[in-house]
């Protein structure tokens, strides 16, 4: 029975890590407006929410399986309190911290956003360092950490997470630059509207055009002259 819990904890941890990175990639592509034209942006947002929720489910399964495995040496105290596991305190601690962050992200986002947008966004963005911490946890205490396929998988996940992160940062910088340019343009327009014209006012001139071919206006034109 312990072998079943060991396999379940191992597989659920790997699946949870993959789903977390996939959810991050979809979320960053959506926020960076880099979703392309084949799918609507709302589709990417729904996929991001679905993958994020599914990832948290596998995180819960992973924690439960580790707790049920008697040979792991992980009890309720080690699951809830960092730096209490014997032998691999830091490795388990990274997993505990990542679990807390993911739980906070899910609670503040599902079934609806809670709190102000600034607070929600700050909490939501902590999922990126939490994903990195989860990868460190897998590398330090994972039973497959020395195998080639596991190293290749973690490398691929890092690449999958870095690309949309760079897209999001570039989009954020471009958006901030465009906002600053619009503010400067509005300020210049307002300044030009309130600044008086330094040139002195000119008197209006009236031009009179006389048709020389009209005999009635020739006499009147001579009087004007």
Image (cartoon, grey):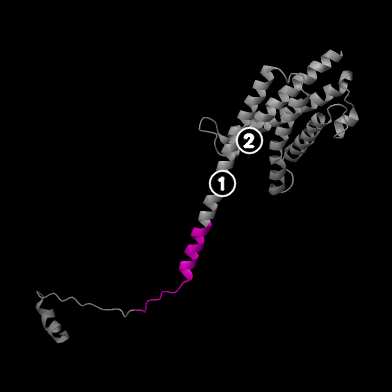
Q: How far across and how far down the image is residue 146, in percent?
A: 72, 19
Marks 1/2: CA distance? 17 Å
Give the farthest residue toward the bottom. 223
**Quadrant of the image occupied by residue 97:** top right
- Residue 111 in sight: no
Label located before the other in sequence (1 or 2): 2
**Quadrant of the image occupied by residue 28:** top right
Query: Residue under circle 2?
Result: 27
Q: How far across and how far down the image is residue 122, in percent?
A: 70, 45
Residue at point 77% right, 19% down? 143
- Pointer 1: residues within 10 angstroms few (<14), some, or many (20+)? few
Q: For the residue labelled by badge 1, is the local secondary structure a helix, a strand or a loop? A: helix
Q: For the residue labelled by badge 2, is the local secondary structure a helix, a strand or a loop? A: helix
* Camera-side residue of 42 and 65: 65
**Quadrant of the image occupied by residue 26:** top right
Please state if 166 lies on the left or on the right of 72 as rendered: left
Q: How far across and how far down the image is residue 160, in percent?
A: 61, 29
* Camera-side residue of 110 and 93: 93
> Foreground mark, 1 or 2?
1
In magenta segment, residue 189: yes
Q: Is residue 130 above or below residue 217?
A: above
In magenta segment, residue 79: no
Q: Is residue 201 above or below residue 189?
A: below
> What's the magenta bit mostly, secondary-structure-wise?
helix
Q: Is residue 41 above or below residue 69?
A: below
The magenta span reads 183-201
Query: Residue under circle 1?
Result: 173
Q: How far across and how far down the image is residue 224, in percent?
A: 17, 85
Residue at point 68% right, 36% down? 128
Please state if 204 lies on the left or on the right of 120 as rendered: left
Residue at point 71% right, 37% down? 129
Count of marks, rendered view: 2
């Amino acid at each position: 029975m312990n072998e079943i819990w060991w396999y379940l904890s191992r597989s659920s941890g790997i699946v949870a890590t993959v789903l977390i990175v996939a959810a991050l990639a979809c979320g960053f592509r959506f926020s960076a407006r880099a979703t392309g034209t084949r799918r609507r942006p709302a589709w990417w947002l729904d996929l991001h929410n679905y993958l994020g929720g599914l990832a948290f489910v596998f995180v819960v399964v992973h924690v439960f399986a580790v707790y049920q495995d008697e040979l792991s040496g992980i009890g309720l105290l080690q699951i809830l309190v960092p730096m209490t596991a014997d032998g691999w305190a830091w490795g388990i601690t990274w997993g505990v911290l990542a679990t807390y962050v993911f739980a906070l992200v899910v609670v503040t986002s599902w079934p609806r956003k809670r709190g102000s947008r600034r607070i929600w966004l700050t909490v939501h963005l902590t999922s990126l360092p939490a994903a990195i911490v989860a990868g460190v946890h897998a590398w330090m205490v994972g039973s497959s950490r020395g195998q080639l396929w596991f190293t290749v998988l973690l490398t691929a996940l890092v690449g999958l997470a870095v690309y949309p992160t760079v897209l999001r940062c570039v989009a954020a910088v471009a958006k901030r630059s465009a906002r600053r340019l619009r503010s400067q343009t509005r300020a210049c327009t307002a300044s030009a509207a309130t600044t008086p014209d330094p040139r002195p006012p000119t008197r209006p001139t009236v031009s009179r055009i006389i048709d020389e071919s009209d005999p009635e206006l020739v006499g009147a034109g001579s009087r004007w002259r």
